[in-house]
Image: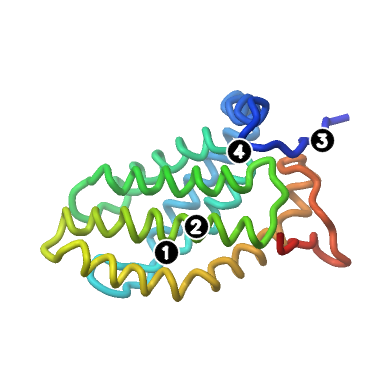
Amino acid sequence: MQQVKPRLSPRSAAYWRAALAELHNLRSLVFAALIVALSIVISAFYIPVADNLRIYFKFLVTAVGSAVYGPVMAGLVGAAADTLGFFIHPSGGYFPGYLLSEVLGNVIFALLLYRRRITVLRLFLARALIDFGVNVALGSLWSAMLYSKGYVFYAGASLVKNSLLLVPEVLLLALLFSMLLPVLTRQNAVPPQERGRFLPRIPWI
């Protein structure tokens, strides 16, 4: 009988041992490769908003992947998806800042979701950290370094976009996890979660 994955805290050594062990888990490696492929495909479709400002939806698949295989694999997946995505869908010159943003976004999702109780609050915190810490703070810096307008211009536009999208993004994540958790739990990909009548209940906190 397969052992149920326990919940762990990133503050514990066991958490990081488990995250490192995912690198030697064939099922995790295959799932990570699938997430890389899906990320590349989905990133080709976006909604342009303003100068170098777009709405992407690949965060949905990277969040699920990060919850399954943890922060170590998540960082590698982010780097692979960004690099391969550039060569498959090239857009301008390659810039390592965007690779860093991709890695950080994946790791943030993993730190809040891997081996954890998945709640709306955790989904909100993860997305808020990515939206404002990665997309606004770092993304605006990358845009200012690459393009003609200053940091304040890009930060202002990015702040408005990410503020408006935060709640819809969290709702989409909650809905997606509600649909996928029955399968992920049965496959022992995530620790057991609370169940509602029809779908796993995503608690608020």
Mark before the other along the chain sequence, 3 or 2: 3
Q: Which residue position is annotated with label 3?
A: 4
Front-lying residue, 106 or 150:
150
- Cα distance in 3D space between marks 4 and 2: 15 Å
Disc 2: CA contacts within 10 A as few (<14), some (14-19) or many (>=20): many
> Where does residue 9 sit, x and y in percent of width and height?
67, 37
Mark 4 / mark 2, whichever is N-terminal: 2
CA gap, disc 2 and disc 1: 7 Å
- Crowd tier of the residue under label 4, counting other residues whose Cα lies within 10 Å: few below 14, some 14–19, many 20 or above: many
- Give me the disc on residue 69: 4
Tag 2: amino acid: Phe
Task: Indicate the quadrant where residue 11 lies.
Answer: top right
How far across and how far down the image is residue 172, in percent? Answer: 59, 68
Q: Residues within 10 Å of mark 1 (few under 14, many from 20)?
A: some
Whole-number angstrom distance, CA of label 3 to CA of label 1? 34 Å
Label 1, secondary structure: give it.
loop
Q: Where does the image place residue 154, in percent across and percent down from the top left?
A: 24, 66
Mark 3, other Cα within 10 Å: few <14 / some 14–19 / many ≥20: some
| Mark 2, residue position | 59
What residue is rendered at 59% in x and 38% in y? 70
Q: Are marks 3 and 2 in contact (CB under 8 Å)?
A: no
Q: Position of residue 195 (x, y in %)?
A: 84, 58
- Quadrant of the drawing holding the N terminus: top right
Question: Is the C-beta separation of discs 2 and 1 under 8 Å?
Answer: yes
Q: Which disc is residue 92 wearing?
A: none
Q: Earlier in the sequence, mark 3 or mark 4?
A: 3
| Residue drawn at x 77%, y 40% as measured from the top left | 188
